[in-house]
Image (cartoon, rainbow, N blue to C red):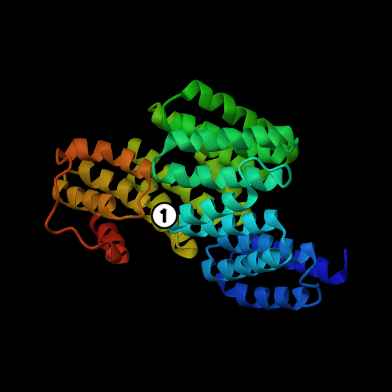
Amino acid sequence: MSDAQQQAKQVIEQIKSTENPEGFPLLLQSLEQALNSIPLSDPFHMDLLLEAGEALTDKGQYPDADRLLQRAFDQAEASKLKGRQALALGLQADIFRAQGNYRSALSKLTAARAIIGQNPREDKNVSARLYILSGLNNMSIGDYDSARSDFIDAYQTYTQINDLNGKAIAANRIGTIATMVAEYAEAERYLQESLKLARELGNRHAMAGALLNLGEIKRLQEKPAEAKPLYHEASVLFAEMGLHRGMCIAENNLGHTSVLLEDFPAAKYHYLRALECAKIAVLIPDMLDTLSGLAFILAERGQCDDAAMLTEFVLRHPAHLQETEQFLKAVQKKINRQGQASLNTPDPNQLEQVIQDTLQKIF
């Protein structure tokens, strides 16, 4: 590996570990300097762009991430490297998904799959990654059957090429879907497999994901006290890696769990941490998930009009997740306002104001 390649790798690792968004411009400048010394036709140059783009996506730096991924795609297209073209499109799709734009994500994923082909003889690792990304997008819109099929395809592909890290991630995703459709025995089997592999490999990302979903099983089985330590361990791992998206999900779930335990001070703490992470990484679907937890608190306190308005706001917002919709069914049952629209429901573009107003009402 050349000095320029090593320098670029070091900068990308700094991007992955940094917690301060103000540091990204300087890091990107250092990355560009290193990349300028690596030929555009060098596949390693494209791989660095792809890795940096994915790291910036995890940090919520979407414009810069998209710019680097587009450069990777253009270079891969010029070099006729189909796998890298497809991966660039898949990672661009994940940027759309993170922001709740599921239709645009699907368009990118469809284009990526068309490039690589349905049954590629080469680039099987890329094919498996596309299955994961497609499954996540299908999961977000509530198409659990398609998501499960995608994750199983990824699991089988990773098994075939003996990629244990990939297999750990795919097993985690299968467990997630099984959890969502209340198939808890199957879910726990895959999640425990994922956790075991992740611990053996020292893969903190996969460990955190497995713990997060094992906690979700306990919460859905109405065992919030057992769910809480699992969510907490997951949140700590995500925080250590500087992954705001994962940390946001874990903190939201800790908030939901605290509500079920009627520990409202703890709920406030976790929801505020979730909102902080969501703001840093511009995670609109996760902000809406936080609001669903706050709607539950309002309903518990008998503030049914406020709870009904907030529920309607979340459900009308195009970026809300299917699992958020499921969570709100309990709120709707409490306020006995299922499906009823409110004349006072704000527009989706007033999300920030709704968050501020709701926090003021509750805390």
Q: Position of residue 319 (x, y in %)?
A: 36, 54
Residue 204 vs residue 332: left or right?
right
Image point 28% across, 61% down: which residue? Answer: 348
Q: Quadrant of residue 3?
A: bottom right
Q: Position of residue 335 (x, y in %)?
A: 16, 40
Which amino acid type is marked by label 1?
Arg
Image point 30% across, 60% down: which residue? Answer: 355
Q: Quick one: 133 or 59, which is closer to the camera?
A: 133
Q: Locate the N terminus by quadrant.
A: bottom right
Q: Quick one: 265 or 76, which is closer to the camera?
A: 76
Q: How many marks?
A: 1
Q: Residues within 10 Å of mark 1 (few under 14, many from 20)?
A: some
Image point 21% across, 43% down: which residue? Answer: 299
Q: Locate the C terminus by quadrant.
A: bottom left
Determine whether 261 is above or below 235 in the image. above
Image point 32% across, 38% down: which residue? Answer: 326
Q: Which residue is mark 1?
A: 103
Q: Position of residue 114 (x, y in %)?
A: 58, 51
